[in-house]
Image (spheres, rainbow, N blue to C red):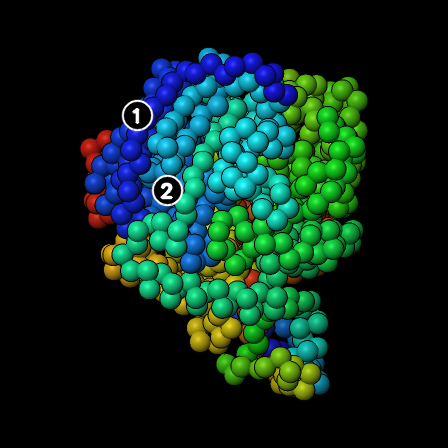
């Protein structure tokens, strides 16, 4: 894998690391791979004031870098890795997230991801609020940032093996002085799947000192890894030694510690009674999604399956190695939810027979391969999880696409001739694994599957004469991005949460299923719009400052639901107070919960306008496939006949006596699609957008983001 | 008839909180129950009777994705 030849130096840059002041360095590291240029640039004070940091910076500087005509694979497109002012704090759980922004190969517009690992804190401690990579290298390169020496290099890569698992081990060996030094290294990498599909991910590492292994987290959605490989980057390596309790040079360490102590105490005393994040992590959700009919089964046709017992939370409790201190993806995080399965023996692919560490599985991966592809087998989930990470492919994008193709196969839209012999029936474990390898290698039917749902639909329609309407109904994508793993048919608010999310149907902007479908706490359109608006903005805030969402509401004060009610309780007010303390403690700026929302609102609106700049972002782009809204097929309707018949009778007042299932489905569909449109009206109105989903000039001025170039885009959409 | 999370549901005699949760398939471990606005602690689910026309809230404390 390492050819042993000397590494050709393409560019070198020496700098004096800027000291951090109150969480910021106010510096950005700009690298242009076409020109082999490395520069230090300043963060404009106005940008800092308006967009706070993290994703806010990423979106603004990407906006600046690209035109409305820029495509994801043009050299002008950038990958921005952003920290945020609270990033790197060790006293509060979940302060290590990198926020990554780029134009997406799936959507064609601005994409954002958050990801754990040590890269973002190391970047800031090395003197940079963000890393901005533009241009394209001619040959594979490795970028190295030495934060202590103040030296950055771009070198041609000597590695022929670019897949993450072995590459990161090799790079740790190469860049660390000795084994002890490996903890000071963090690496961004992808793999061959990132270059051969549209859903490439970025893996970001940290070194697990207890296992003596490199661990990874994923920036998974929208294909940023594909951009990374298109730029011919094999890896970005950063090295930093010397983290202290106050590396961020905060304004009031006592206030930061006060928030940290309060949260840590809750996690340590309540996690085992609440979500068990320290035991299995996000996969704890699987049982609940299954029990409440929200687990996607067979391409989101159904919400549960008897075989889901085989991949339930208890199974993972036994499979992931317990009580591992190295399971925190940033220092000081007591949630410690980044679990791993040790010594898993691979049964297929290039590493067949090797015993590997599998990072995960997360809920999404388990639900995607287990439920959606109908492969209720923990070993399949682990093998698919490992190879997707290793190849640099998004487990959500891959599993949702395979599930879609499986439904096409079972409906004779594609056959063995088209798939090259793969029998893509739901539950065919060997076919799933073979297709993952083919996708990664860009071979066979994997070339079509690797396009993702939207572009695969186009091929099936144009080349194989598939019914476009049916594929639109069952192809679970919106804006070009595949849905994450929740069945939303009975939660109108979550349908909107997915459909109106800026980057596409990913749950990090909104997750309202239980509040809506089960608790019925937001029954009216106004209630739902209020929740979609508030929670999308609140969740956006984490990405501005460099935090993880999980410690916000995957742990709650014991008396939260008794002290607060309805939507207030769901906000977890004491944790919001923690965030206000943290922000003030770090930056010295007092902030109220309302001002925190305002910070997000500016960035959220800018992102919506960025979509408009790139040619989408209006009402028609917020429409979700009908599979997300109601039953597409007779089989689906019949599976919950009692529920749907009751809704027809009691809500729609439709006399279903003597009617066929098809007739009932038609009436239900008209009603549900109307409800979705009414929800869009309510949300746009609540957000200060017009009926086409375009932010109004009045709202833009109110938010003080009325920069001339922003106004120019919006004015084009004024009726 | 009773209300459960604002939705109508048939009432039956000797209906306890515990039995109602079972009937609704509310298996999530972290829930808070209120009957006519009054909090019912978990240890009393078995003995707390729900009367006809009662308004029951079962709030699931789940964070999700």
Q: Determine the image quadrant of residue A343.
A: top right
Horizontal and vertical percent position of residue A136: 43, 18
Nearer-the-camera pick, A142 or B38: A142
Q: Which residue is mark 1?
A: A39
Identify the residue at horizontal 45%, vertical 34% (top origin): A238
Report how far apart the C-alphas of labels 2 and 1 lie in the structure.
17 Å
Chain letter for mark 2, please: A
Q: Along the horizontal axis of the image, is A129 left or right of A630?
A: left
Nearest the viewer among A598 and A552 is A552
Which residue corresponds to the image point at 30% horizontal and 51% vertical from the top-left?
A249
* Residue at (37, 32) in percent of width and height: A149
Q: What mark, if any, has residue A166 been given in the picture?
A: none
Residue A220, x across and y down, in percent: 54, 37
Which numbered disc, 2 or 1, marks the residue closer to the eye?
Answer: 2
Q: Quadrant of the N terminus of chain A?
A: top right
* Residue A643 seen in the figure: no
Q: Is residue A540 above or below residue B9?
A: above
**Pointers 2 and 1 in contact (CB under 8 A)?**
no
Q: Position of residue A301 (x, y in %)?
A: 68, 45
Percent x, y of residue A397: 59, 35
Q: Quadrant of residue A606?
A: top left
Q: Is residue A84 above or below residue B48?
A: above
The image shows residue A502, relative to residue A89, as above or below, that is above
Q: Which residue is mark 2?
A: A125
For label 2, the SS is helix
**Residue at position x 67%, y 41% from top?**
A358
Q: Secondary structure at mark 1?
A: strand
- Counting residues from the N terminus, which is met first, the one under dot 2 or under dot 1? 1
* Among the 4 quarters of the image, the one containing residue A564: bottom left
Work out whether residue A646 can be spotted: yes
């Amino acid at each position: 894998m390492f050819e042993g030849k000397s590494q050709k130096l393409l560019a070198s840059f020496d700098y004096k690391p800027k000291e951090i002041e109150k969480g910021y360095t106010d510096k950005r590291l700009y690298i242009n791979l076409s020109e082999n240029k490395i520069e230090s640039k300043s963060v404009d004070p106005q940008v800092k004031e308006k967009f706070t940091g993290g994703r806010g910076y990423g979106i603004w500087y990407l906006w600046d870098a690209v035109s409305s005509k820029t495509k994801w694979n043009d050299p002008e497109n950038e990958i921005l890795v952003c920290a945020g002012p609270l990033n790197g704090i060790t006293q509060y759980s979940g302060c290590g997230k990198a926020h990554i922004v780029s134009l997406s190969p799936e959507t064609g517009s601005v994409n954002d991801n958050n990801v754990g690992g040590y890269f973002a804190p190391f970047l800031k401690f090395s003197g940079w609020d963000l890393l901005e990579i533009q241009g394209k290298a001619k040959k594979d390169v490795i970028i190295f940032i030495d934060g202590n020496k103040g030296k950055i290099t771009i070198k041609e890569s000597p590695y022929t093996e670019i897949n993450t698992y072995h590459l990161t081990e090799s790079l740790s060996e190469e860049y660390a002085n000795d084994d002890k030094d490996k903890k000071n290294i963090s690496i961004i990498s992808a793999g061959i799947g990132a270059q051969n599909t549209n859903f490439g991910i970025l893996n970001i590492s940290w070194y697990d000192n207890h296992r003596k292994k490199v661990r990874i987290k994923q920036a998974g959605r929208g294909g940023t890894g594909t951009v990374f490989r298109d730029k011919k980057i094999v890896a970005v390596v950063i090295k930093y030694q010397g983290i202290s309790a106050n590396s961020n040079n905060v304004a009031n360490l006592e206030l930061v510690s006060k928030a940290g102590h309060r949260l840590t105490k809750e996690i340590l005393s309540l996690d085992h009674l609440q979500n068990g994040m320290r035991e299995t992590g996000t996969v704890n959700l699987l049982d609940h999604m299954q029990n409440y009919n929200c687990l996607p089964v067979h391409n989101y046709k159904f919400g549960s399956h008897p075989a889901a017992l085989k991949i339930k939370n208890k199974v993972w409790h036994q499979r992931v190695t317990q009580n591992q201190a190295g399971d925190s993806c940033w220092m000081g995080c007591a949630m410690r939810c980044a679990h791993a399965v040790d010594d898993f023996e691979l049964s297929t692919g290039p590493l067949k027979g090797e015993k590997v560490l599998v990072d995960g599985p997360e809920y999404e991966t388990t639900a995607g391969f287990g439920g959606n592809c109908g492969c209720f087998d923990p070993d399949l989930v682990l093998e698919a999880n490992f190879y997707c990470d290793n190849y640099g492919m998004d487990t959500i994008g891959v599993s949702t696409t395979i599930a879609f193709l499986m439904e096409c196969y079972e409906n004779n839209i594609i056959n063995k001739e088209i798939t090259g012999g793969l029998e893509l029936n739901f539950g065919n474990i060997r076919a799933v694994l073979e297709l993952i390898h083919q996708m990664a290698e860009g071979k066979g039917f994997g070339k079509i599957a690797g396009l993702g749902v939207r572009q695969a639909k186009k091929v099936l329609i144009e080349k194989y004469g598939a019914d476009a309407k049916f594929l639109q109904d069952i192809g679970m994508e919106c804006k070009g991005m595949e849905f994450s793993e929740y069945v939303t048919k009975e939660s109108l608010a979550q349908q909107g949460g997915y459909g109106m999310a800026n980057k596409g149907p990913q749950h990090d902007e909104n997750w309202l299923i239980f509040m809506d479908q089960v608790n019925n706490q937001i029954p009216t359109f106004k209630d739902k719009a209020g929740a979609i608006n508030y929670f999308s903005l609140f969740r956006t805030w984490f990405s501005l400052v460099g935090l993880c969402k999980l410690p916000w509401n995957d742990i709650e004060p014991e008396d939260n639901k008794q002290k607060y009610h309805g939507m207030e309780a769901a906000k977890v007010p004491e944790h919001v107070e923690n965030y206000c303390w943290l922000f003030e403690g770090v930056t010295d700026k007092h902030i109220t919960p309302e001002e925190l929302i305002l910070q997000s609102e500016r960035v959220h609106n800018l992102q919506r306008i960025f979509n408009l700049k790139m040619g989408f972002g209006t009402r028609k782009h917020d429409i979700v496939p009908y599979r997300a809204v109601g039953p597409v097929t007779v089989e689906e309707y019949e599976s919950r006949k009692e529920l749907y018949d009751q809704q027809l009778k009691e809500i729609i007042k439709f006399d279903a006596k003597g009617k066929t299932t098809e007739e009932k489905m038609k009436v239900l569909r008209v009603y549900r699609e109307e409800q979705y449109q009414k929800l869009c009206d309510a949300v746009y109105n609540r957000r200060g957008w017009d009926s086409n989903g375009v932010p109004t000039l009045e709202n833009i001025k109110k938010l003080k983001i009325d920069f001339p170039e922003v106004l120019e885009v919006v004015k084009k959409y004024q009726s | 008839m009773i209300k459960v999370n604002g939705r109508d549901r048939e009432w039956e005699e000797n209906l306890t909180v515990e039995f109602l949760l079972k009937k609704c398939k509310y298996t999530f471990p972290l829930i808070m129950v209120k009957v006519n606005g009054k909090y019912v602690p978990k240890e009393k689910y078995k003995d707390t009777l729900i009367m006809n026309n009662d308004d029951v809230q079962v709030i699931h404390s789940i964070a999700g994705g």
